[in-house]
Amino acid sequence: MYRVEITTEDPTTISASTDKAIIACKVYSWDADITNTLDVSLFNWKRTSNNKEQDEIWNAMPEHQGVKSIMIDADDVIENSSFYCEVNLPE
């Protein structure tokens, strides 16, 4: 059984133009953190907002692919945006 968790030590709400947050993706096999054993190429960040076209552009950007953590700021947020990480685990 695998579990994917998004963590942040920063605020989870970006409301001012100067706000920033680093969000990280952690992967667990049962209760063991296996994140460091996985290749970064397996991690792909996605954004969901009320603007599907802009989300598709954001999701395709190379800086959101192949990294275990990303920094988001006000430029990344369109009104109400959610961020998640797809982890393509090997079978």
Image (cartoon, rainbow, N blue to C red):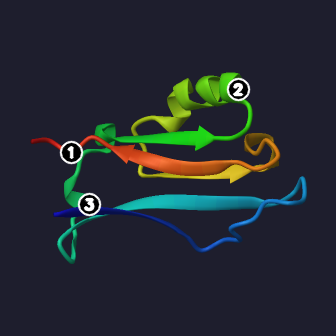
Q: Residue at x 60, y 25 (%)?
A: 56
Which picture quadrant has residue 50?
A: top right
How many numbered markers are drawn? 3
Position above or below: 12 against 87: below
Considering the numbered disc 3 on the image, is that residue within a helix, a strand or a loop?
helix
The kind of residue on which mark 3 rests is Asn
Q: Earlier in the sequence, mark 3 or mark 2?
A: 3
Residue indicated by mark 3 = 36
Q: Earlier in the sequence, mark 1 or mark 3?
A: 3
Question: Disc 3 and disc 2: Cα gap in Å?
Answer: 31 Å
For the residues carrying marks 1 and 3, which lies nearer the camera in this image? 1
Q: Nearer the viewer, residue 41 or 15?
A: 15
Dot 2 surroundings within 10 Å: few (below 14), some, or many (20 or more)? some
Tell me if 38 is positioned left or right of 46 in this view.
left
For the residues carrying marks 3 and 2, which lies nearer the camera in this image? 2
Marks 1,2: beta carbons within 8 A: no
Q: Residue at x 60, y 41 (%)?
A: 47
User: What quarter of the picture does the N terminus occupy?
Assistant: bottom left
The kind of residue on which mark 1 rests is Leu
The kind of residue on which mark 2 rests is Gln
Dot 3 surroundings within 10 Å: few (below 14), some, or many (20 or more)? few
- Can you give x and y, in whole percent of width and height, for residue 67 in the image? 43, 44
Residue indicated by mark 2 = 54
Q: Earlier in the sequence, mark 1 or mark 2?
A: 2
Residue indicated by mark 1 = 89
Dot 1 surroundings within 10 Å: few (below 14), some, or many (20 or more)? few
Q: Which mark is residue 65?
A: none
- Can you give x and y, in whole percent of width and height, for residue 4 in the image? 34, 60
